[in-house]
Image: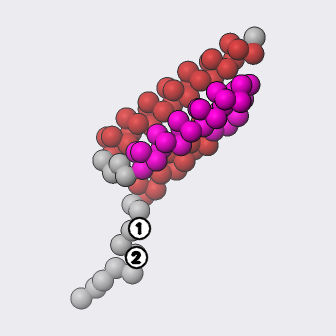
Amino acid sequence: MATSRLPPATLTLKQFMRRQQVLLLYRRILQAIREVPNDSDRKYLKDWAREEFRRNKSATQEDTIRMMITQGNMQLKELEKTLALAKS
């Protein structure tokens, strides 16, 4: 009887890659938020980003996670465009 030596919570390669995508998106969003000039806006956006990621932390369906990554990237691009306009 062969049993797996891996712990029960081991991620598959696909899950690991998705996790890396999510973490990269989170870091990129926080980096963009650091560029926001107004302190109260920056705090609001930081709290919003943290809450969104926490709220969706338990998502496990591949399609749902892919959709959320796509939406997060679109929101990041929108934030970057807004910041670029504010600087010009």
Residue at 71 percent across and 25 percent down: it is 38
Q: Residue under label 2, please give it.
A: 6
Question: For residue 40, which quarter of the picture?
Answer: top right
Q: Secondary structure at mark 1?
A: loop
Residue 65 visible within the image: yes
Viewed as shown, does residue 83 lie left or right of 61?
right
Task: Read off the magenta span.
Answer: 30-57
Q: Is residue 71 above or below residue 18?
A: above
Choose between 3 and 53: the one closer to the eye.
53
Residue 68 in the image: x percent, y percent? 41, 36
Q: Amino acid at mark 2?
A: Leu
Q: Quadrant of the C terminus?
A: top right
Q: Secondary structure at mark 2?
A: loop
Viewed as shown, does residue 67 lie left or right of 19?
left
Q: Quadrant of the N terminus?
A: bottom left
Q: Residue under label 1, please give it.
A: 10
Residue 35 in the image: x percent, y percent? 72, 29
Asked if the stretch drawn in magenta spans residue 35, the answer is: yes
Name the residue at the bottom extreme: 1
Q: Is residue 47 above or below residue 54?
A: above
Do the residues under discs 1 and 2 have CB atoms within 8 angstroms?
yes
Q: Residues within 10 Å of mark 2 (few under 14, many from 20)?
A: few
Residue at 49 percent across and 26 percent down: it is 74
Name the residue at the front extreme: 40
Q: Residues within 10 Å of mark 1 (few under 14, many from 20)?
A: few
Residue at 34 percent across and 79 percent down: it is 4
Q: Amino acid at mark 1?
A: Thr
Q: Which mark is residue 77?
A: none
